[in-house]
């Protein structure tokens, strides 16, 4: 019972500031900003969000954005883990790839939008390619660093057992680095959503980012604020799911030990 009351108290404390901000925005939008074409009270945004829920446009746009972000995240994470593991295990491969990695890693993912448009045109493939590029680098860096921290004696045992490289990664490297890779996964989830929405605002006529831009161009601040709030809620939910999966993995590995 005491633990439950503590959770309720923490939730109330966490909600106090957002509620105060919403109340302040409501007051400001209905007084000083009541004639503004760029501001809308949160109550109007909530009504616009309800209409988007009812007519199905919210679900359609959200499904497109999450599908593109999820597929791009999967491709980027797998590619980053594969190359990061290789660079972590082989000093020679690391020295050969060093210059290429350091030249490409700082390139902003949105700078690839024109190239991706030329290659893939408009649509999901273009968006997925940009998201994959953005999420590739965090996983590569984290995987390389995590593999470097694997106990060398474990790798020596694998070599003594004459395990092939794939078996060595599956049986030795992956279990040792998996907890650290969840940090990269949580970062990648946030990056994937941000990049996907940015691509939709800049170039791709689909998804939540495009819906947000259309609301802005239509001078509908209530709908614009509704989409902005919804994107924030989606990001919060994705991060919470990733954090929950990380904790479940940590508990499972602790029980395994």
Image (tube, rainbow, N blue to C red):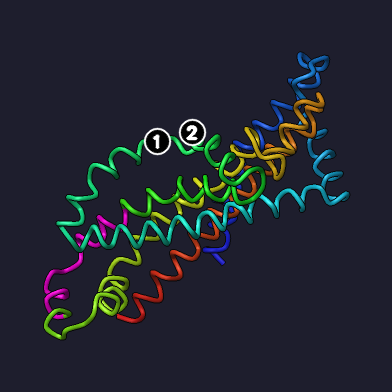
The picture quadrant where one finds residue 152 is bottom left
Q: How many numbered marks appear? A: 2
Q: Does the magenta run of residues contain 75?
A: no
In the rendered image, residue 87, in percent from the top left (x then y), is placed at 24, 57
Q: Quadrant of the N terminus?
A: bottom right
Q: Is residue 22 above or below residue 206?
A: above
Please give left or right for residue 133 compared with residue 55 in the image. left
Please give left or right for residue 148 compared with residue 256 in the image. left
Circle 2 is placed at which residue position? 111
Magenta-highlighted residues: 142-157
In the rendered image, residue 246, in percent from the top left (x then y), is placed at 44, 64
Q: Nearer the viewer, residue 250 or 38?
A: 38
In the rendered image, residue 23, in percent from the top left (x then y), is placed at 71, 30
Q: Quadrant of the C terminus?
A: bottom left
Q: Is residue 19 above or below residue 240?
A: above
Q: Secondary structure at mark 1?
A: loop
Disc marking residue 206: none
Circle 1 is placed at which residue position? 107
Mark 2: few, some, or many residues within 10 Å (few <14, many ≥20)? few
Main structural element of the magenta stretch: helix, strand or loop? helix
Please give left or right for residue 27 compared with residue 55 in the image. left
CB-based contact (under 8 Å), mark 2 and mark 1: yes
Please give left or right for residue 158 compared with residue 257 in the image. left
In the rendered image, residue 215, in percent from the top left (x then y), is placed at 78, 31
Question: Cα distance, mark 2 to mark 1?
Answer: 7 Å
Q: Secondary structure at mark 2?
A: helix
Identified at 40% across, 35% down, the residue is: 107
Identified at 32% across, 76% down, the residue is: 170
The picture quadrant where one finds residue 153 is bottom left
Q: Nearer the viewer, residue 223 or 247?
A: 223
């Amino acid at each position: 019972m005491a633990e439950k009351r503590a959770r309720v108290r923490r939730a109330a404390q966490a909600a106090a500031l957002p509620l105060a901000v919403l109340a302040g925005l409501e007051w400001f939008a209905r007084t000083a900003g009541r004639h503004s074409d760029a501001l809308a009270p949160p109550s109007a945004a909530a009504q616009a969000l309800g209409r988007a829920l009812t007519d199905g446009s919210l679900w359609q746009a959200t499904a497109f954005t999450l599908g593109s972000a999820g597929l791009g995240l999967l491709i980027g994470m797998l590619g980053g883990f594969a190359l990061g593991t290789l660079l972590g295990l082989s000093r020679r491969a690391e020295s050969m790839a060093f210059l290429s990695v350091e030249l490409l890693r700082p390139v902003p993912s949105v700078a690839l939008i024109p190239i991706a448009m030329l290659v893939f045109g408009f649509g999901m493939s273009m968006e997925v390619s940009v998201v994959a590029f953005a999420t590739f680098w965090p996983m590569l860096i984290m995987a390389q660093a995590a593999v470097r921290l694997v106990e060398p004696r474990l790798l020596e045992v694998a070599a003594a057992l004459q395990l092939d490289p794939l078996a060595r990664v599956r049986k030795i490297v992956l279990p040792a680095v998996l907890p650290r890779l969840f940090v990269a996964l949580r970062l990648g989830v946030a990056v994937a959503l941000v990049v996907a929405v940015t691509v939709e605002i800049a170039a791709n006529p689909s998804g939540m980012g495009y819906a947000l831009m259309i609301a802005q161009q239509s001078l509908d601040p209530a709908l614009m604020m509704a989409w902005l709030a919804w994107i924030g809620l989606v990001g919060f939910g994705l991060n919470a799911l990733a954090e929950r999966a990380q904790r479940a993995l940590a508990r499972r590995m602790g029980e395994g030990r």
